[in-house]
Image (tube, grey):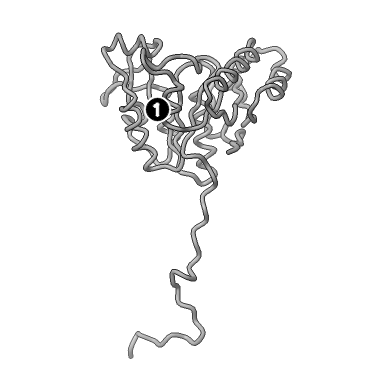
Amino acid sequence: MSHNQPPVAGAIRPTAANRADPAPRPACPPGVFVTGTDTGIGKSLASAALLHALRARGLRAVGMKPVASGCEPGPDGWRNEDALLLQAASSPVPSYEDVNPYALPQPLAPEIAAAEAGVSIELDTILAAHARLAAQADCVVVEGVGGWAAPISATLDQVDLVRALDVPVVLVVGLRLGAINHARLSARALQADGVRAIGWIANGIDPDMARADENFEILRARLPMPCWGRLPYAPQPDPHALAQRLAPVF
């Protein structure tokens, strides 16, 4: 008996014309640049949480920290804790060398750390690593260094990198005394540099901050871009759990 049965009358064969299209991916820019009001205000945590939030939307999202100072030696070379956090939050998981092309040993300003390491930070090297990441992701979240005005090298400012990447900027505001001034000055600097700031994230870094809620509301009223969320202070924060507190608006 033949196993090749004639087609059932009225049956519809799956063809390119009638096969269901895959669900479209949510709208998202191909990348964002995360800067902050200062160093040590939680850019890496916010970036990692943002990666998880994008992944929850069905996007392939990978992190990048082009220049990191304060690295530790390991069997595979110098590694930075913040860059490793971004790598772990990424999907697909990229190579460390692309996540962090410049891993500098000393915990100093990048320009000084690079000079002490005898390293020249080149824009082309960063752009090449970024291109490799972009080829495997829907969105690349790039974390900057320190605050917005902190230089990357003697010849490279963060605004130069943002313009070369052609990506919008997200500002992380560390909630502590002085945050309102730092945030408003940073927002004005972003505007003066002509970059597109599309959102800001509040990050609780001082558990004893007085009137934190009131400060947050003032920032929401005064900053010229939408708030993407507020991350509470936690001694050992979990970026995956914190992702639920973010609502990126593109």
| Above or below: residue 101 compared with residue 183 | below
**Residue at image location 52% in from the left, 21% down from the top:** 193
Q: In this view, does 211 lie to the left or right of 199?
A: right
Write down the residue under mark 1.
Answer: 84
Q: Give the position of the N terminus as an image quadrant.
A: bottom left
Q: What residue type is labelled 1?
A: Leu
**Residue at image location 51% in from the left, 23% down from the top:** 35
Q: Measured from the top left, where is residue 70 in percent x and y?
A: 38, 15
Q: Measured from the top left, where is residue 111 in percent x and y?
A: 37, 12
Front position in the image: 164 or 37: 164
Front position in the image: 162 or 58: 162
Q: In this view, does 191 lie to the left or right of 94?
A: right
Q: Give the position of the C terminus as an image quadrant.
A: top right
**Which type of secondary structure does the marked residue at label 1 adopt?**
helix
| Above or below: residue 131 compared with residue 101 | below
Neighbour class for label 1 at 10 Å: few (<14), some, many (≥20)?
some
Q: Measured from the top left, where is residue 106 in percent x and y?
A: 35, 11
Q: In this view, does 48 lie to the left or right of 186?
A: left
Front position in the image: 160 or 15: 160
**Residue at image location 61% in from the left, 17% down from the top:** 183
